[in-house]
Image (cartoon, rainbow, N blue to C red):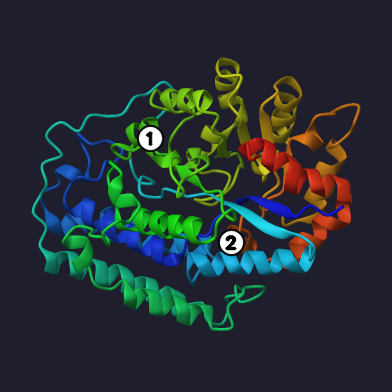
Amino acid sequence: MEPDYRYDAHCHIFTLEYLLKEAKNMVQDMLKRTYPWKEPTESKLLTSDKESFTAGKGILPIMKDLLRQLYELLHAALGSEAKNLNFLQEEAGKAFPDSSLRITPLMMDIFYLLAYPLKKDADLQTFVGLRATTSVDMNEFQSIWDEILDDFKSYLESKRVTDKRAKGTYSPDDPIELALALIEKERSVQETFLLRKNATGSYSDSLEFYHTNGFCFHMDNLMELVGTQKDELYPFIAIDPRRTGMVETLLSGSFFTGDKRFYGVKLYPRMGVHPLSKPMDAVYQYCSDNNLPITFHCGMSGFPPGTDWKYTDYGNPANFEPVIVKYPKLRIDFAHLGSSDKSYQWAAKIIDMINKYDNVYTDLSCYVDKDDIDRVKGYCDDKKNPKLINRLMFGTDFDVMYFTGKITMQDYYDHFKSIFSADELKKMMHDNPMRFMNIP
């Protein structure tokens, strides 16, 4: 019997507009000398020469490169969060016409990608004397942002011939033109310069953490969908302890109360936060005590791309085993089953922990290669790994999956349907996600 609902347990519906807004806020904090660079006592925060600050190793080349990387992260999210949700539901309906789709959109906090890392056993750094805001001239801010956007615009226009991203996306329009329109929409720095002001009653304005335009823009749009599309979204909040007030807001319970709320926590070690850094223990304790699941990125690649990224090993599943031992009731999804690890050592470690511990899960999001799915199917052996099929979840990783340029959404569904049985898919797309998220 077909389940009434199937779950996409790992997807993203943030947009390029969110990324542009957040990048603009990063530039502003860099100009104000309040951005927490890797070495705050010796960093660009102390540079008094504005010309050198925005050249060489300063803001301009860093942010130009970052916008290009962020664009490559997205291959379809050029509309709105609502449009992304509708697209996911329509595509799932083609694959499973007797079921409706519920999704778990995972927020992502990119703001601290260039900040100092939180290493194992490390605590938050204190920025003594560096939090006094340097006056920022709006015209200078606009000039720098214009140069960054003009470079980004040239980059997009150069991709008109070679870009393959139109394949399989929902938009009938030219994606390059859509991106260029968003650039012009985010051209002015005035809103950022005058500090973010949302409409009265917006979700994020009621919370006590460091607000940046992009992060709050996405959060508010996500919560609006939770309110209007009841029982269709189960979002997870991205926690980066370097965002001032974020852990404190989590511990207050504010994210998880009311009709508009989050259902779990998303951690992204590749951004530079080691799972065993000191601020994270309070997060684990709270989630364990309050029956909240955690999904954390556990693939050797992701964003930033490449398996040689300097924080790749922060996502090694072995880093989490002490947490599992300390908090045996804490449900953790090791997302991607360690994908892009050609040795499959990360996958083997995850499966070993699934066999040993009761509350360890994994998902197969962004499995665009049919051979990789087939290999995972081989691990679902009743004798060797009897628990795996009951802890394995389906996810698309929309729209990051389009980054590969290999697949359409329907191909993605067809690959899973050809490899797993109907009963296995029911477990992966219904039973296991409901148990992981504690949905009655």
Disc 2 to disc 1, how far (Cα)? 27 Å
Query: Which residue is at 28% across, 51% downward?
Result: 205
Give the side of residue 251 with respect to residue 399, left or right: left
Disc on res. 77:
none
Vertical side of 309 occupied by 20: above or below: below
Disc on res. 117:
1
Q: From the viewer's perspective, is the residue at label 2 or at label 1 nearer?
A: 2
Give the side of residue 287 with respect to residue 18, left or right: right
Q: Which amino acid does label 1 sit on?
A: Pro
Q: In terms of depth relative to the viewer, which is nearer, 68 or 286?
A: 286
Q: In terms of depth relative to the viewer, which is nearer, 346 or 14?
A: 14
Residue 26, how many percent across, how many down? Answer: 29, 54
Residue 206, how many percent across, how many down? Answer: 29, 47
Q: Residues within 10 Å of mark 2 (few under 14, many from 20)?
A: many
Query: Which residue is at 18% across, 44% downward?
Result: 45
Q: Which amino acid does label 2 sit on?
A: Asp
Q: Name the residue under label 2.
A: 399
Q: Can residue 168 be seen?
A: yes
Vertical side of 234 occupied by 152: above or below: below
Give the side of residue 293 with respect to residue 220, left or right: right
